[in-house]
Amino acid sequence: MPRDFLAGASDSYDVVVIGSGLAGLTSANILARAGYSVLLLEHHYQLGGMATWFKRAGGHIFDISLHGFPWGMIKSCRKYWSREIADSIVPLREVRFENPQFSLRTSFTRDDFTRIMTEHFRLEPERVSQFFDTARGMNFFDEQKKTTGELFHEFFPGRDDVVRMLMEPITYANGSTLEDPAITYGIVFSNFMQKGVYTFQGGTDSLVTKMKDVMIENGVDLRIRCLVEKIEVGPDRKVQGVIVNGRRIGCRAVVSNANIRSTVLDLAGESSFDREFVEETRAVRMNNSSCQVYMALKPGEGFDSSCGDLLFHSDHRGFDIDAMLSKDVSSRTFSFYYPETRPGSDRWMVVSSTNANYRDWTGLSEEEYRLAKEDLIETTLQCLEQYVPHIRSALDHVEAATPGTFERYTRHYMGASFGTKFEGLKISQELPRQVSGLFHAGSVGIIMSGWLGAVNYGVIVSNEVDKLLSTNTAV
Ligand SMILES: Cc1cc2nc3c(=O)[nH]c(=O)nc-3n(C[C@H](O)[C@H](O)[C@H](O)COP(=O)(O)OP(=O)(O)OC[C@H]3O[C@@H](n4cnc5c(N)ncnc54)[C@H](O)[C@@H]3O)c2cc1C
């Protein structure tokens, strides 16, 4: 008999959360803490979604998306998770840029960027200050016609070196480009500029284990290897339940942490929505996907701390989104992990991340795919030799992930790493107006992606669910 991963589950709950990304986990935790019965269903064998890790022989543990997030994560974790989780969030020491236009090291704060922009790029201090204030003052309710490219042109016309420093890290952080609305840049950039870039000491495995403990304490019924096949919507356009691993479970509300397009088009199904809403959902563009190369050094072997924590490397001149996404990689972000990442360990690791087009990695034969991955690994090692000259002799394990990997583990359309473009946020927010009791919390609209965006969106949506459930009587 196959194992029943729903053994002991009730036949109905107040809330079913589909997916255990950071938004799904946060919603589940807040709603259980508020006293609702909550079932969390995750198709993968591990909780965390993109906030994940994997282990390899020899005691190596690789983090997938633990490269850096803004300081605001401390406050969100303290308020909605635990003091213990918040207290493990620590700043990165140094961010580096190495490209044909400049070689720089920074703490990635407003003060330090101001220093670089005035001393290195020779910009007027007043102009720089106005730029920061404008970016900081942007919010969701502003007009959204201005693009990020237009914002840069207004402040720093003709300065592709300045644009590169301001834009490249944000493109790596959330996939946004010069064509996206300026507010998506302003909000995310300003979040980072407040106090620099932070990480979770102990690694993603420790974070997710701690979150799991908090959820169990609050009474969330957690289930892995549980694939939701359908969200049941009644003829009155109210959520009734879900079908998971072939079993029906009733509920008063669903929070879907699955991709917004899959939530509408596949899980609930088109017939549950207005036609225009379905058309608008179909038109939502996915953000780019990623490739990564994971490199573990032999136990005790390391690299110099001068490598920094995050290194934005590029061989390309200027900021060029097509070059950044190209399979012919010219830009990489290296994350250098020192033993302090997991205190007590003797491991140094490097993870190289590149933004990637899903289409470049699909439709390949098995042999073409294998060769393409080998090439990605080889060119990455060649590039890394500039910074860690002995990397090949020190290497204990290396492997690569592609857009297909991200698609398989998270079921995101086109392996999207950072949810959708800006228009996805509207669909996500309007979902409960189409189907009562159906909510979405997860990476959408650029501003609601990344670790901080996902956690905060989970908070916002759980408040909406609470409002609905506290005014409705039980079914
Ligand atoms: C390579 C890479 C590097 C990144 N680096 C950073 C970084 O340094 N800093 C940062 O802040 N962010 C980073 N991110 C982005 C960040 O990890 C994500 O934005 C965030 O973790 C997404 O959280 P989420 O809640 O939207 O859900 P996701 O993590 O997308 O999780 C969705 C979950 O739903 C589950 N699911 C989907 N469909 C179903 C179904 N039908 N039934 C059951 N379960 C289902 C999936 O299995 C998954 O677990 C990175 C992402 C990638 C890919």
Image (tube, rainbow, N blue to C red):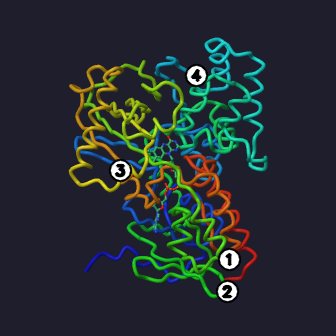
Please indicate, yes or no, whether residue 335 appears anywhere in the rendered image.
Answer: no
Which residue sits at x=46%, y=21%? 98
Q: Pointer 2: residues within 10 angstroms few (<14), some, or many (20+)? A: few
Disc on the earlier residue, 3 or 1: 3
List x then y, in percent, for residue 231.
53, 77
Q: Residue at x 51, y 73 (%)?
A: 267
Q: Can residue 69 be seen?
A: yes
Q: Whole-percent x and y of residue 156? A: 69, 24
Residue at the spot of label 2 = 236
- Spatial CA distance of label 4 from label 3 is 31 Å
Q: Position of residue 234 (x, y in %)?
A: 61, 86
Amino acid type assigned to the residue bearing label 3 in the image: Trp
Q: Identify residue type, mark 2.
A: Asp
- Rounded to the nearest angstrom, the CA distance separating label 3 from label 2 is 42 Å
Instruction: From the viewer's perspective, tell me whether residue 442 is left or right of residue 347.
Output: right
Q: To which residue does mark 3 refer?
A: 361
Q: Which residue is mark 1?
A: 436
Which residue has dot 4 on it? 161
Q: Nearer the viewer, mark 4 or mark 1?
A: 4
